[in-house]
Image: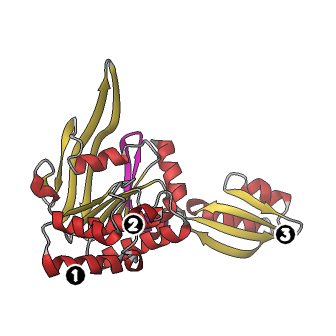
Amino acid sequence: MERVIVTESLTKIYKSGKRRTEAVRDLSLEIKRGEVFGFIGPNGAGKSTTIKMLLSILYPTSGKAWVFGVDVRSPDARKRVGYLPENPRFYDYLSGEEFLRFAGMLAGLSGSRLEKKVESLLKYVGIYDARKRKLRKYSKGMIQRIGLAQALMGDPDLIILDEPTSGLDPLGRKLTLDLIRSLRSRGKTVFFSTHILKDVEEVADRVGILFKGRLLKVFSLDEERQRENDYQIEIENAGIDLFIAAEKLAELTKKDEKRVTFLVREDNLFEFLEAVRDKGGRIITLTRKKRNLEEIFLETIGEG
């Protein structure tokens, strides 16, 4: 499968007098064609700095990066890329339609081809009915969507989005995530940064965790969820002997007069079940509990 983005030991150091701040350190990464890649980390982790280096808005202190096999320092690297920054600022005296027409002209479109493209993008991002409204009257969610429309004006194969759902209300977030899904269904590659883990769980194929400028982990979300699962086990007739036996095997999560519930790691499951049987307990329910992205994230940054 074609590699759309490749970085090798990408590093960005800011200097102020004798002070050195490593914004990104030794980042090596590959993004494949057609995937949605979620680039996650807390604010200040280096996500935006990484994106700006991929676009040559910032130059790395060391290391290299390629987009579609072209060195990002070459203007040719950006011909197949669309970009939406975290806080887009547009000419707010223009209407949505006028702004996209302007963006299309910058992309080299004209005449009927331009008008058809403007109309199709306005419909695609769901703001066709607001096309005559001035951008200053757009909500934040609408600004994000018109920004995504301008990023798609040149029909790019790679779309880079920096915090695309930050600050949006639930409806705005849903609409943006639906657009990301739609882009994937059209064969586009989407690289998006965020600190909102739930959004990544909903749309990403793979995830990279960035923390304090270091890329700690890259993984398939589905594969990682299946790797180390916990089991939630509800038991009746749990006597003191079972509690003693279970102390090192499981975590007690709930207790009432008749039943108790334990959380058991997969590698302790069979030993725990034997203890329940030997100590006279009766299993009522046994449920596999998948790890969520928040658990994976916290575990990863704790190790890093």
To which quarter of the image does residue 233 belong? bottom right
Residue range highlighted in magenta = 207-226
Residue 232, image x and y in percent? 66, 67
Q: Residue at x 31, y 19 (%)?
A: 17
Residue 80, image x and y in percent? 17, 64
C-alpha span from label 2 to label 1: 20 Å
Amino acid type, mark 1: Lys
Q: Residue at x 34, y 37 (%)?
A: 23
The tag earlier along the polypeptide, 2 or 3, is: 2
Q: Nearer the viewer, residue 44 or 294?
A: 44
Most prominent secondary structure in the magenta stretch?
strand
User: Counting other residues with Cα less than 10 Å from the Cα at mark 3, is it few (<14), some (14-19), or many (20 or more)?
Assistant: some
The tag earlier along the polypeptide, 2 or 1, is: 1
Instruction: State the SS at label 1.
Output: helix
Q: Which residue is mark 2?
A: 134
The tag earlier along the polypeptide, 1 or 3, is: 1
Query: Is residue 210 inside the magenta stretch?
Result: yes
